[in-house]
Image (cartoon, rainbow, N blue to C red):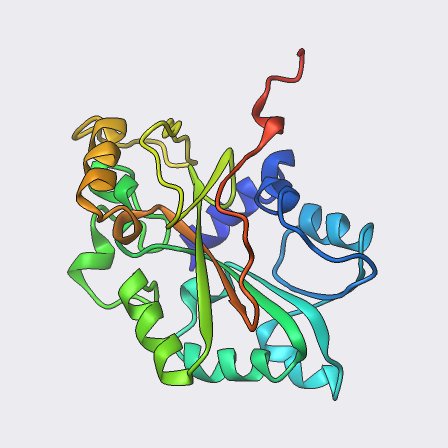
Amino acid sequence: MKQIRKYRDFYNNIKYRTNVFEWYPFKENAKLLYVGDSAILESYFLQRFKCCTTSLSNLDTLNDSTFDYIIVDGEFDCMDDKETALCDLLNKLDLEGQLILLTNNKLALRYFAGVKEFESDEFFGNLKKHTNLYSKNQWDTLFSKLKVHAQYYYPYPDYFLTKQVLSDEWLTGNINLEYEDCHEFRYSFFNENIALQSLVESGDFATFSNSFMIILFNHKSNIIYSKISSERKDNF
C-alpha cells in the first residue's frame, strides 16, 4: 500500500492526468460521481459536470442518488472484494448510465519488460503471489458473473500519462512505450515496441496491455481510436 500511495501521489499531480478522458464523448450537463483521489481530475470534472466525489467505503452516504457517469480511478487495484463494490456502484447508475473503470493490468507488458511493480514493490510480484490486481480474463469472468456489458479501451503508455487510446477494433504497433516511473531502478529485458507489435499480430495485445479503461454500459460507444494532442511539448 505504501508503494501504491507513492506512485499515485507522484502521477496524480501531473497535468497529463486528464488525457485519458479528453477524448471521451460525455454528454452535457451530466451528473457524475468521481471515486478517486486525484485533485487534478476532481477539478477537471467539477468544471464540466454536476460532480460529486466519494470513496468506495462511503457510497452509502449518497443515499438514493444516481448518476449518468461513475468514474472509478484505480480504486479497484488494491481492493479484495471487487464483486460487492461493483454491485454497489452499478446500483448508483441511471438506466442509461455508464460506469468507467481505470485499472492497471496484472499482466502488464511493462512488468515483463523490467519495470518494477508499484502494486507489490517487486519485480514480477503479481505473478509470484496473490495480489488484488486483475488480468483481463479475471475482469471478464467477473462481468460475466454479474451479467454486465463491458467495452475495453487501452490507454498508452497507461491511464496516468495517456497519449493514445486503442480498442479491440483498432490496434497498432505504432505506440510510444517510453515509460517513466518513480522507481529508482528498472531493467530493460527487451524492446517493448517490438514485443508489442508481435502481440498485436498474434492477437494477444489485450492480455498484456499496461492498463485498462473499461466501460460498463447499456449502449456501446462507436469510438475505436483516439490520439491525445496534448502530448505535444509545451513550447509548441
Give the farthest residue toward the top.
235
Quadrant occupied by the N terminus? bottom left
Residue 85 in the image: above or below residue 76 = below
Q: Residue at x 38, y 26 (%)?
A: 178
Residue 64 in the image: above or below residue 104 = below
Q: Residue at x 65, y 42 (%)?
A: 22
Q: Residue at x 47, y 85 (%)?
A: 84
Nearest the camera: 212 or 121?
Answer: 212
Residue 167 screen position, x and y as percent: 42, 48
Q: Residue at x 37, y 36 (%)?
A: 183
Residue 221 screen position, x and y as percent: 56, 57
Nearest the camera: 120 or 132?
Answer: 132
Quadrant of the rendered image containing residue 94: bottom right
Horizontal side of 102 relative to 41 (left or right) equals: left
Quadrant occupied by the C terminus? top right
Residue 142 screen position, x and y as percent: 36, 77
Residue 46 screen position, x and y as percent: 80, 55
